[in-house]
Amino acid sequence: MTLNILFIGDIVGKPGMDMVQTWLPPLKKKYKADITIVNGENSAEGKGCTEKEGKVLFDLGVDVITGGNHTWDKRQSQDYLKVESRSLRPLNYPKGTYGHGYFIFNSEKGKVAVVNLQGRSFLPAIDCPFRTAEWITSKLLEETKMIFVDFHAEATAEKLALGNFLDGKVSVLVGTHTHIQTSDERIFPKGTAYITDVGMTGPYDSIIGMKTDAAINRFLYATPQKYQTATDQVHLCGIFAQVDTETGNALSIERLLIPEFEKVKSY
């Protein structure tokens, strides 16, 4: 039996949320998704995921929301972590940090574990994602062989290293955070589907989702700048993966990139 996984990459503010509301229903129908996962760490106007965005996404049929370093940028998104176990934060934050780093979803084809991890290269020096991944996968494999990992990390080398480290231990590992989609989707030798970065769902006439002037000035003057979410050339990025429910091995991975001008299709 085959499990169908639909994952939508980093949703950026209202433009990204609007794109998801337009495209998620037909995509779920097209791919006959058994589980739908989105990264929502930037969904609340570029920072965090609050109850407002969470309700919209869950009402659309999202099953799990993953996060990242910007999950902590809004107090409301921090509060949401305390009450919604399906909205995740990276598991490898220090012991005692509130919120959940993984969730086990009961699909019609069996249990699927969704794990959120964060890298340490060019990001805060939190607990080791490799050791944390090693611990949680050994625990989860006692319950299910179908494990999906969102690795929110800056460095491509760190993402590739974790992908190889977990090859054969997880079904799918996707990279998020850099907002630039890579074209290296593949299945590793031991059966793990992988892509270095899924890309963002948001405005591409921007610098990774933000208006360009402030982002350029930050580099020019090395001073803090007020970021604002851009609005134009909105794209949806994601992946579709199929997993063997018996072995947990990936069977396929397909990269998705949909521009806003593409006509919505009825599948």
Image (cartoon, helix red, strand yellow):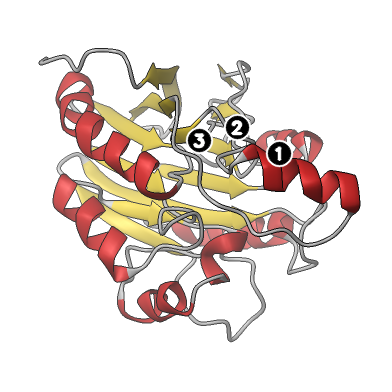
Q: Which image quadrant is residue 110 in?
A: top left
- Identify the residue at the far right of this view: 221
Q: Amino acid at mark 1?
A: Lys
> Which residue is more in the foreground, 256 or 158?
256
What type is the residue that disc 2 sits on?
Asp
| Residue drawn at 50 percent across, 54 percent down | 46
Q: Residue at x 82, y 53 (%)?
A: 122
Q: Which residue is mark 1?
A: 159
Q: Are marks 1 and 3 in contact (CB under 8 Å)?
A: no
Q: Sort mark 1 into few (<14), some (14-19) or many (20+) by Cα contacts within 10 Å.
A: many
**Mark 1 vs mark 3: in front:** 3
Say left or right for 124 vs 171: right
Q: Residue furthest bottom?
A: 96
The answer to whether 243 is drawn above or below residue 51 in the figure is above
Q: Is residue 137 visible?
A: no
Q: Which residue is mark 2?
A: 197
Q: Give left or right: position of 183 versus 202.
A: right
At horizontal 17% and vertical 46% (from top left) the residue drawn is: 60
Residue type indicated by callout 3: Met
Q: Check disc 3 and report its element: helix, strand or loop.
A: loop
Residues at circles 2 and 1 in contact by the CB criterion of under 8 Å: yes
Looking at marks 2 and 1 on the same chain, the residue that comes earlier in the sequence is marked by 1
Residue at position x 14%, y 25% in the image = 29
The mark nearer the N terminus, 1 or 3, is 1
Q: Quadrant of residue 56?
A: bottom left
Of badges 2 and 1, nearer the viewer stands 2
Q: Is residue 80 left or right of residue 136?
A: left
Q: Which residue is mark 3?
A: 200
